[in-house]
Amino acid sequence: MQVVGGRLDLVPGEEKTEAVPGSWIHLPARLPHSVRAVEPGVMLLPGAGALPAA
């Protein structure tokens, strides 16, 4: 995940970190995580691909 704008609280697994513009975060497949916007932001999910149809 790449943070383009804003500020995010990110918890990948058990570790809490703050993500700011320019941050890159690698999330392995199936890793439980949470993301909370501290302020409005934009993030990119490179390689996420298309989601399957419901």
Image (cartoon, grey):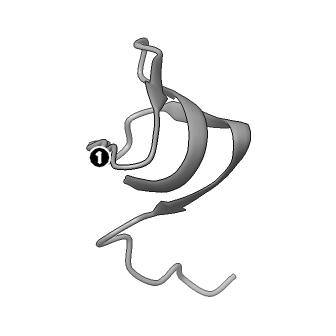
Q: Measuring from the top left, give residue 30's x and y in whole percent.
A: 38, 43
Q: Quadrant of residue 13?
A: top left
**Image quadrant for the C terminus?**
bottom right
When the figure is inspected, residue 21 is found, relative to residue 18, above or below; the finding is below
Q: Measuring from the top left, give residue 1's x and y in whole percent.
A: 37, 53
Q: Measuring from the top left, give residue 34's x and y in whole percent.
A: 58, 33
| Residue plotted at (41% across, 65% down) | 45
Q: Quadrant of residue 46?
A: bottom left
| Residue plotted at (47% across, 15% down) | 16
Q: Is residue 23 left or right of residue 5?
A: left
Q: Measuring from the top left, give residue 6's x and y in whole percent.
A: 60, 47
How busy is the neighbourhood of tag 1: few (under 14 within 10 Å), some, or many (20 plus)? some
| Amino acid marked by disc 1 | Trp
- Residue position marked by numbered label 1 in the rendering: 24
When the figure is inspected, residue 47 is found, relative to residue 28, above or below; the finding is below
Q: Quadrant of residue 17?
A: top left
Q: Is residue 32 left or right of residue 36?
A: left
When the figure is inspected, residue 49 is found, relative to residue 35, above or below; the finding is below
Q: Secondary structure at mark 1?
A: loop
Q: Is residue 28 left or right of residue 42?
A: left
User: Is 44 or 34 nearer to us in this picture?
Assistant: 44
